[in-house]
Amino acid sequence: MPNHTDAPRRYPAKPAAAYLFSTCLVDQFSPEAGLDAVRLLEREGIAVHFPPDQTCCGQPAYSSGYPEEAKAVARLQLDLFPEPWPVVVPSGSCAAMMLHNYPKLFADDPVLGPKAVALAERVFEFTEFLVHVVGFSRHDEAAEPCTIALHTSCHARREMGVHATSAALLAGLHKVTVAQQARAEECCGFGGTFSLRHPEISEAIVTDKVASLKESGAEAVVSADCGCLFNILGHAEFLDKEAGRKPTLPGEHIASFLWRRTGGGDQA
Amino acid sequence: MSQPIHFHPSSGFDQRSREAMNDLHLRRSFRGAMDFLQAKRRAQFTDANELSRLRDLGEAIRRHALANLPQLLEELESRLSRNGVQVHWAQTPEEARAIVLEIAKRKEAKSVVKGKSMVSEEIGLNHALEAAGIDALETDMGEYIVQLAGEAPSHIIMPAIHKTKQQIAELFAAKLPGVAYTENVDELIRIGREVLRKKFATADIGLSGVNFMVAETGTLFLVENEGNGRMCTTVPKVHIAITGIEKVVAKLDHVAILNTLLPRSATGQPVETYQNFISSPRKPGELDGPDEVHLILLDNGRTQAYGDVQLRATLQCIRCGACMNHCPVYARIGGHAYGTTYPGPIGAIISPHLLGLGATHRLATASTLCGACAEVCPVRIPITDLLVRLRNEAQAADADSSLRGAGESRKPLVSILFRAWALVYRYPTLYRLSTWLMSRGRAFMPGYQGAWTGIRTPLIPAKKRLRDLMAERQRTN
Ligand code: SF4
């Protein structure tokens, strides 16, 4: 199959209900991000359904050379979204896995193949969904001014083509200044199991990423991907602890940031 | 003496990349060069739609060529033969070297001047020539520098990119008689040129690579910036061109399109300084050109890639080097760490066919799958998909893979871990139980989490999972 990712996606009208596929990382390690995503969507009048049987998109096995194991796990998710609602994923990486790789994984299967394709068509990365489907347009007039840096995950950027949507959401917040960082488009060095298989190369990359985020003058970093955040923030925090100083680069998922900036925190 | 390529590049990869990353000069050289080349490329493609269309065309041309590879190669051979070019086929590097040595022997050649050719590196030609007592001189400035230093190229387009100008100045002063240390780049180039000029006039054979071969006309197309390629292919009495079998395209028009992509993707130049179209030896009445032109077509594992519907895309490559210029891993470990003729993302996907997967599997894992390579590839090779596929083949349990060396590097323990992982994540009950246990035991989460915590704080599960928070909300609503 030719590899054309330049073609624009078609987006549905704003629905009354949507599914959340939270991803395993959010479920276990960053549930607040998931909850804030739910709150944001519900405030926009969308009923959010969380199928409790969901686990993981299967990417760890997929990218490590274990397609059968990836398939076994992906297979479970295929049946969890029976209604024709959009499936919102607060991670560009996992969304890309479902959008691009599910159809490839099940391409030879006459039953699951079409199912995977049908699911892929309604999988949306969270910021992509807010911009293109919800038409999110809330302001942050009541919030304090702040300067932050945005890290866009490689999969959100390149496979989903949605690097613009995180930036657009931040641009819509009048009191937020987005700091310019050197090599914003470069990977943070996470790469899932890459960070364990090639720890030293991963370290070299994340070291540079943390340095350029700090040099940007940002007070904090936001991202739509928890994997990248754990890597970047975990390294920044490690350096701070080594040096025995206060945190120098905090950060959070863009869902939490948006929710708080647009007054969500006050109502909760 | 050039440094031999590692025939088992996987072993020692970690060691070599560690050394490269600890060499701050090297880090700075690569980073600076990569930033420069990325910016130059970006400035060439300011219109995203034009770029997208051109890449579609580039991809279509290369896919068309590969889909018709046997016929096109036959057509090419018959055209070239009719034009008076002698075509040789080599299945292995040994065969290719033997063909060159055979010609050299017949011509009683004492010296060879070489234009830039990665395939000649692939077959270790310089060693073979030296062993046969033939003087082989690289004439591309970058190749000349690495040859002088006894090294291998670290980049397929810019072979000496790992060297600072101070290092080159030292090298010239040390190795060239009567040359004083100077950091003036123009002066360094002038010095190099002077040495080379003399050699062109006296060499018995000129050797070059090929960028594209045109089947319909029987033309070898070769681009370069220094004029050394033209000298190598026109001054000596014999010209030997050597390249891989995949470099053929059907029509001359196709070259026009591919060559709008090649220099812009590679060095960010709108067009190369020299474009050479070579269709025959010197004809009666012509003023210059060699008496003999030979083309050596090398397989060396390329047919293995060709035989696989997915991996065939590897052969679409036009060797522009853009994938390495944009690779975050290559930018940090440089070209030599890979231990292969072709480094970077293209090296990781082509080397398994040349050297076997057992020897090269580690290269395919040395990628975050960030996709920067595939994003810039002018012929749209889905590099990340191919990396994933090679990872699969490297782990394949049964030897029903047709790839040489598949499954050789399989690690039983990792396989068991992934099987266990899949078991937990495919059964919601097991997943719920294990994540519940992890949340409960969060206080006992080890502070040491393998390589992760070497430079990061540990990952600690939240007190309550999102599913718990969602269930609570439902109850209270
Ligand atoms: S794989 Fe693509 S980007 Fe890399 S050298 Fe080949 S053509 Fe260029």
Image: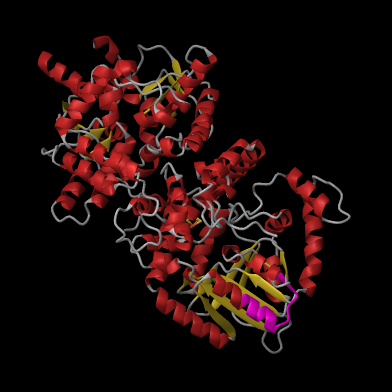
- Quarter-of-image position of residue B235: bottom right
Q: Eyeballing the image, is A46 above or below B166?
A: above
- Whether residue B133 sits left or right of residue B377 in the image: it is right
The residue positioned 16% from the left and 28% from the top of the image is: A50
- Quarter-of-image position of residue A129: top left
Q: In which quadrant of the rendered image does the N terminus of chain A lie?
A: bottom left
What residue span does the magenta drawing correspond to? B100-113
The residue positioned 79% from the left and 73% from the top of the image is: B201
- Whether residue A41 sits left or right of residue B218 in the image: it is left
Image coords of residue B376 (percent x, y): 47, 50
B317 or B57, nearer to the observer: B317
Image coords of residue B263 (percent x, y): 57, 57
The residue positioned 43% from the left and 60% from the top of the image is: B314
Q: Is residue B238 visible?
A: yes
Image coords of residue A123 (percent x, y): 23, 39
Q: Is residue A18 visible?
A: no
Residue extending farthest to the bottom is: B284
Colour scheme of the rendered structure: secondary structure
Asked whether B105 falls inside the magenta stretch, the response is yes
Q: Eyeballing the image, is A5 above or below B292?
A: above
